Image (spheres, rainbow, N blue to C red):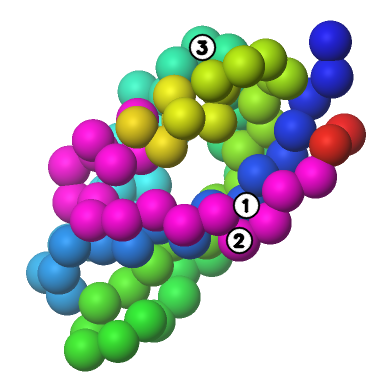
Amino acid sequence: MGKFLLVYLIKLESPEVDPEEVTKKIRENLPEDFQMQDEVKIKPLFFGIKGIEAQFILPEHEGIQDKLEDYLRNTEGVSEVEVQYMTRL
């Protein structure tokens, strides 16, 4: 079975949300079949709101990307997620 590398921009709810804390929550509770790469970038977006650019490696099977996006959206402090890049490994 193949794998995919996906790069996401994870937009935070407000300027008060700490991107380091959200990154920590995502890592700690990440479902077993997902891998989050070590390199994470914090990017300024607009009106003081920040975004987290993170890379994930997922196994190739149907519905897996939706599962990751649902997980990210349901993380406290996250307002929106957007795929920046996707490639097959």
* Residues rendered magenta in the picture: 71-87
Image coordinates of residue 61 in percent, x first then y, are 67, 15
Task: State which mark lies toward you, 3 or 2.
Answer: 2
- Quarter containing the C terminus: top right
Percent of width and height locating residue 32:
51, 12
Q: Which amino acid does label 2 sit on?
A: Gln
Q: Mark 3 points at which residue?
A: 32
Q: Earlier in the sequence, mark 2 or mark 1?
A: 1
Residue under label 1 = 7
Residue at image x 84%, y 37%?
88
Residue extending farthest to the front is 62
Is residue 40 among what the camera can see? no
Residue 13 image offset from top left, x and y in percent: 17, 62
Q: In which quarter of the image is residue 29?
A: top left
Check if residue 86 falls in the magenta segment.
Answer: yes
Q: Name the one closer to the observer, 7 or 52.
A: 7
Horizontally, residue 30 falls left or right of residue 74, namely right
Q: Residues within 10 Å of mark 2 (few under 14, many from 20)?
A: few
Alpha-carbon distance for marks 3 and 1? 18 Å
In the rendered image, is residue 62 in sight?
A: yes
